[in-house]
Image (cartoon, coloured by chain):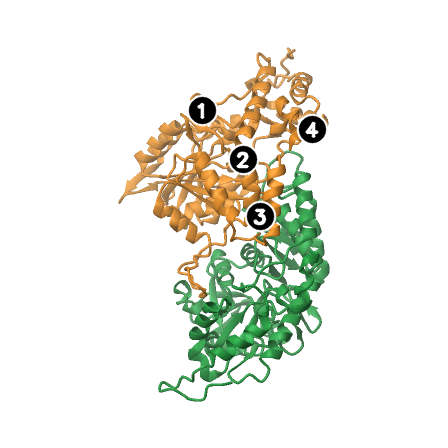
Chain colours: A orange, B green
Amino acid sequence: MSSSSAIADRRAQLDVGAVLAAVDTVLGSASRPVALHEPRLGAREREFVLDCIDTNWVSSAGKYVSRFEQMVAAATGARHAIAIVNGTAALHAALLLEGVQANDEVILPAITFVATANAVSHAGAIPHIVDSSWDTLGLDPAALDAHLEEISVRRNGDLFNKLTGRRIRAVVPVHIFGHPVDMTPLLAVAAKYGLVVVEDATESLGSTWQGQACGTFGHSAVLSFNGNKIITTGGGGMILTDDDAHATRARHFTTTAKKSHAWSFDHDEVGYNYRLPNINAALGCGQMERLSAMVEAKRELAGRYLAVFDGFANASIYREPNGAQSNYWLNTLVLDREYAGERDRLLSALHANGVHARPLWTPMHVLPMYRNCPRSRLPVAEDMYARCVNLPSSPFLAASEQTTTIKN
Amino acid sequence: MSSSSAIADRRAQLDVGAVLAAVDTVLGSASRPVALHEPRLGAREREFVLDCIDTNWVSSAGKYVSRFEQMVAAATGARHAIAIVNGTAALHAALLLEGVQANDEVILPAITFVATANAVSHAGAIPHIVDSSWDTLGLDPAALDAHLEEISVRRNGDLFNKLTGRRIRAVVPVHIFGHPVDMTPLLAVAAKYGLVVVEDATESLGSTWQGQACGTFGHSAVLSFNGNKIITTGGGGMILTDDDAHATRARHFTTTAKKSHAWSFDHDEVGYNYRLPNINAALGCGQMERLSAMVEAKRELAGRYLAVFDGFANASIYREPNGAQSNYWLNTLVLDREYAGERDRLLSALHANGVHARPLWTPMHVLPMYRNCPRSRLPVAEDMYARCVNLPSSPFLAASEQTTTIKN
């Protein structure tokens, strides 16, 4: 099943045909091309959205926004959930609410969707890029500790980057593809250096770590309900926090900071127009009713990928970290080290075969606008980027789900 | 019908009862409380939104976004329309796209919704507040000219504020309540001083000035489709421009600046996640089909307000400017000068009577975060704020529309 010859430039030749065959085994009869991730919508989403239209409540006032917030709070165990227009806006607002100021630095991993770094930029701050761990695919607490030990200094209760002179205010662990970051050591490192933790849980709704939901470890966290996420509101996001005062302030700040009054339009600070419309929240209410089923279906799909690639010679499927229950938002094929140079040939073959796979996002420090950002050494991030390929992960690709599609 | 006695503090006493009676005549049998403005949604909105759900296309990809853009472009005559997540985001992006930089000043009227000033702040720039005109309720070109003559200087092709040393980059005329700003002199003043014009047409879709649509006079313009606007997408906005290259760049900049590729996630600048979701655009497509009918209904309602208050002793309804065809987004009762002190007593009485009227937005220079912004003298803005009251303006309050509601 595996290729045997190493070629001249030390690049081993991947048995692409074997990978295609294995992927085809998992995807079964799904019609080609197979998207990387598609939402699943049904009767309840129709019902709630039509209720919005029929009652003329489609905008920022309306019962579904509160209901959606309550459903997400209940599902995660977060004390407060504030619905936001999208995940980028949620992280932007969350950072500002945590006191991130212009010219601060905010720590984030190299391997993440660009929105994580963009939200930092939108807040006027500078991404400070730190290496990831193969244990979780997310920020590496040990690498963070070693890096901060080397480049930072505490002064008057704040942490400063000795190389740039800028304050380092916060750290944003991202639970990549639904796999939780190793939060106990991450929180310990953050506490050691006095950094605020804002979890980027945009990919990890439904994931838990040590039995606790992703999005409930940091002082605040953000979710995303973009169309490619585990549940969708078209576009949408959320801020989670257990801090009552913080939640009150977040709600005010993201609704133009308008003071409540029967008729006056008074605002007491520069706020944002970041509220999620009611019609999008209505979709979210329908989606939340199926969250458990979606996670179950996605875990079942992951189980099939894991089984088919078990003992595979050139590559393996990434398995959830110890102690984690992952939503397996995106399944990840990891090429063995000697096949790192074969990633793009594999991607071409998969696409030619109607399988919309993709590599990891281009690492943040490689993008032109973030090339000069402060950073740690990034050997793991670069290795991950060279060797990982995401495979189609729509929940309805799971066998038992395929048979129930018509019920919706 | 009018009160006759002037009281001690030179405040004439408004005949509130007469105003209530006149408003009640217009509102007729509409059930109380009557909101200031409610959307109207029907069969086509249901159809398009359900199509999104049934085809699994609710997010940022999908046919309704393009269709909605084409419908708005066709209705306004703008060459390009780029759908955005809301009006504030549209203005924020439009200002950045026009080259507004941190610490620039941007001219806007004191009388506008706070989002106009907030979008300037979000761009890192400083609102520079200029007086309005009773002729249009919008920015006064003559006041702008006189003010710039006094405080500005041209240097190396840019305009600078002599008092602050900052560059003045752009002017944002806002077509208040749908009434077009006097655009010929405004454009002439902007050209004289080298200012870019970005129209805030968030309230004026369907309005024309000299036969040309609001939103097509500036180098770019923005629309809003918030729930209280003439058409709604729940939340939504749009950038209009006739400039091909500008439109291409706007589209890229508002979709995370992602480079097109079958699988790579590469981005070439710090872009925004500002795209309108497909499900919101689907609502918009339904709404655009009724735009003409909405404008007609609103003009009919305005006609009834004008008729009922014709010859009224203490106040009058604001009439569209000469040369304009207004959408009459919000109808405005203007108290005669001697009754300026009676506004809040009138508002209390209207609310007590189930009529959700409101004053103008608190002027920008009165809000705490904009109190210290550069500004011209603002006598007209302050006079307007003291004397104007917006009355319920939902299109279905028009008599002929009330009878057709059930068709939808």
Q: Nearer the viewer, residue B304 or B159?
A: B304
Q: Are marks 1 and 2 on the same chain?
A: yes
Image spot of residue B405 (x, y percent): 67, 60
Q: Nearer the viewer, residue A177 or B38?
A: B38
The disc placed on residue A289 is 2
Marks 3 and 1, Cα distance to the nearest angstrom?
Answer: 33 Å
Residue of label 3: A279
- Disc 1 to disc 4: CB gap under 8 Å: no
Chain ID of residue with mark 3:
A
Element type at mark 3: helix
A66 is higher (above) or lower (below) than A402:
below
**Is the N terminus of chain A in the top left, top right, bottom left or bottom right quadrant?**
top right
Label 2 vs label 4, nearer the camera: 2
Label 1 vs label 4, nearer the camera: 1
Q: Nearer the viewer, residue B223 or A5?
A: B223
Element type at mark 4: helix
Pointer 1 or 2: first along the chain: 2
Pointer 2 or 3: first along the chain: 3
The disc placed on residue A351 is 4
Pointer 2 or 4: first along the chain: 2
Label 1 vs label 2, nearer the camera: 2
